[in-house]
Each structure stands twice: as C-alpha cells, then as structure tokens.
Image (cartoon, rainbow, N blue to C red):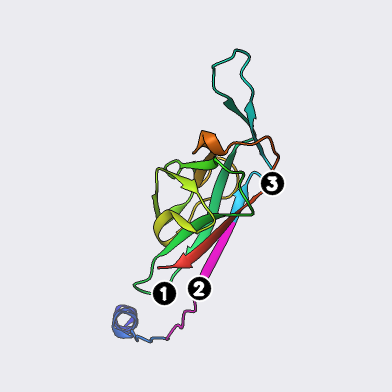
Amino acid sequence: MRKILFLLLISNFAFGQATLSVGVNFTLPSVSLLDIAPDRSTFTLSFTAPTEAGNQITTTSSNNTKWLNFSSAVPPSVTRKVMASVSGTMPGGVNINLAVASVAGAGAGARGTPVSSLTLTTSPQAIVNNIGGAYTGNGANNGYMLTFTLGIGDFSLLRNQTSNVTIVYTMVDN
C-alpha cells in the first residue's frame, strides 16, 4: 500500500505543472551626454620666436591633450555625431588643428568613427561619426583622445597679439 501511495504522489508531482506569463514593459530614455576629461581647464597653445634670423616661428603647447567621453542611447535607426567648433575670434593667419585618435579604454557599443584630423573653424565640423547606443568610459584614457596644435595658415596675416577662444562640442542626431 505504501508503494502505491508513493507512486501516486510522484505521478502527481510529475504531471502537475502549470505555465504562467507576465508582461514586462521597458522604458529606455534617449541619452546624449558629453564630457571632457580629465577636466575642462584652459590649455595654452603659443608660438616661440626664432633665435636666428630667417627661421620661422615654432609652436609650443602645454596640457594640449583632452579626452572626449560620452554616453548615447538612440532611437531605432538613428545615429549621432559629435561636432566641434571655435567660438571667438582667431588671430589672423593662425589655425587650431585637432587630431582625434581611435577610441580607447573602457566602454562598449557603437562608439563611432573618428575623423583623423581637421582645422577647427567657427562652423561646427564632425569629429566622431556614426555613434549609436554606446558609452566610452569615464575620465582620461577612455573615449577619444583629442590633441590640439597651433598651425600657421597664412604668414602674411600674423600679428603680435593674444587671443582667447572656446572650443564648443555638441552631440547631434544624424
């Protein structure tokens, strides 16, 4: 009798299954955040006078490397890009050149494709294209290394002067 009762109990457990389902709603907001690392401090680009007649002036710089960090969550079929421009008046004949290195460090997702280098102007230009859902990691050595240098576009326009400009970054949908 005990064997029969035991078998009846086992058979009830083996065939007494039920399946339920519960719906789950997801909400993912659009995210578009930018940061410059390690900080947004001013850096200096300057020229050095030659010590010998007939030589051209040279450029010097300090703290001229920054890191572009971002977080991005995009709607379906949308990509973004990061634009950069100069706000303010550049001295005549002088250019600010920007080199954008490949993405580095932590992060994941569709982190985009950098342009190699360009001369910044007052018109926004893409510096990273095709950003999707992604993050670069936070701080120095994460994201895109940005290296700024001075260039001379036209020697005939050079004048003894000092100028301060701001570099503006904007993340926009394509």
**What's under tag 2, amino acid-wise?**
Ser
Q: Which residue is mark 3?
A: 164
How many residues crowd mark 2 within 10 Å: few (<14), some (14–19), many (20+)?
few
Q: Of marks 1 and 2, which one's residue comes earlier in the chain?
A: 2
**Number of marks:** 3
For the residues labelled 1 and 2, say whether their Cβ atoms are less than 8 Å apart: yes
In this rendering, the answer to whether 3 lies above or below 82 is below
**What's under tag 3, amino acid-wise?**
Asn
The numbered dot on residue 30 is 2
In this rendering, the answer to whether 24 lies above or below 32 is below
Distance between the Cα atoms at labels 3 and 1? 38 Å
Say left or right for 165 vs 157.
Answer: right
Distance between the Cα atoms at labels 1 and 2? 7 Å
Q: Which residue is mark 1?
A: 75
Residue 106 in picture, x, y percent from top left: 49, 46
* Magenta-drawn stretch, dominant element (helix, strand or loop): loop
Q: Quadrant of residue 78?
A: bottom left
Residue 90 in picture, x, y percent from top left: 61, 47
Residue at the front extreme? 156
**What's under tag 1, amino acid-wise?**
Pro
- Secondary structure beneath dot 3 equals loop
The numbered dot on residue 14 is none
For the residues labelled 2 and 3, say whether their Cβ atoms are less than 8 Å apart: no
Whether residue 58 is visible here, answered yes or no, is yes
Tell us which disc is closer to us: 2 or 3: 3
Q: Specify the segment rendered in magenta.
A: 23-34
